[in-house]
Amino acid sequence: MNVSRFESDLSKLARRLTTGEESSVRARVGQVKSDLVKMYRENLVKINHSVIELVAAKHLILQGYDVRVEHKISQNLVCDLYGKRTGSDILVEIETGFVPPAHALDPVTYCSARIASKTARYSPFAKRFVLGTTQSNILTIPKIYIEHTPSESMAEAEQVKALCDRYYNSPPIETEAIIEERLNAIYVIDVDRGDVLEVSPAEYREQVEHLKFRLHQDPKHFVEPE
């Protein structure tokens, strides 16, 4: 564990994020940085995840939220970012696209289940639920979290539940929770520039589906096994 390197990297990023900002913004970003350093000393966070959290935290601070990182929202759940302001609160979960070795052969399906599971489990704890990811990662968002008709809801929810149960069944996610909860926005986070682009889940999914269509239509993207 290299605490000095972790702190140096976060301090450098915090300075970059707050150049030209008001002193109150600098102080609040600095507090988030300090919280992350403390958590790193306790071996609770990693650098690649923390830098994304810091950029997202600054985005929330500029919107007037009081931000907490690695915030406990229930006995068993800790969210990456929780923001509260008068009349509203927001919960942000960061997705880096990490896939454990056990799922090296089904990474897309595994990540899809993780996104579905997170949305069902976390979204009840705030008025707004957001998934944050980097430009280097692509989220696969179940259609039911974007739009659905009542006649299709149960069938779609059962499909999502089956997907979640395949990877996350302790405790299992109830079908009703999948139907009721929603994903409000996607944060596309650019750590290099310190920027956050907020897009609707529908817009994000449309772009991903277009990319998937092109991959499936163009055989030059695939190599036949020898």
Image (cartoon, grey):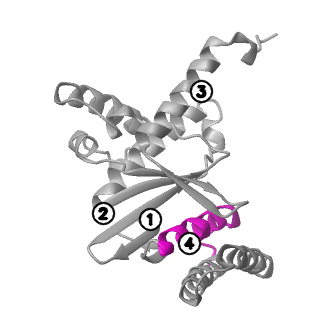
Image quadrant occupied by the N terminus = bottom right
| Secondary structure of residue under mark 4 | helix
Front: mark 3 or 2: 3
The span from disc 4 to disc 1 (Cα, nearest Å) is 17 Å
Residue at position x 55%, y 83% in the image: 25
Q: Are marks 4 and 1 in contact (CB under 8 Å)?
A: no
Q: Is residue 221 above or below residue 39?
A: above
Q: Which residue is mark 2?
A: 125
Residue at position x 26%, y 73% in the image: 87
| Secondary structure of residue under mark 2 | helix
Q: Are marks 2 and 1 in contact (CB under 8 Å)?
A: yes
Residue at position x 50%, y 73% in the image: 62
Q: Position of residue 187 (x, y in %)?
A: 52, 54
Q: Are marks 1 and 3 in contact (CB under 8 Å)?
A: no
Q: Which residue is mark 3?
A: 211
Front: mark 4 or 2: 4
Give the label on residue 79, or none.
1
Q: Earlier in the sequence, mark 4 or mark 2?
A: 4
Q: Position of residue 162 (x, y in %)?
A: 35, 31
Q: Which residue is mark 4?
A: 58
| Secondary structure of residue under mark 1 | strand
Q: Earlier in the sequence, mark 1 or mark 3?
A: 1
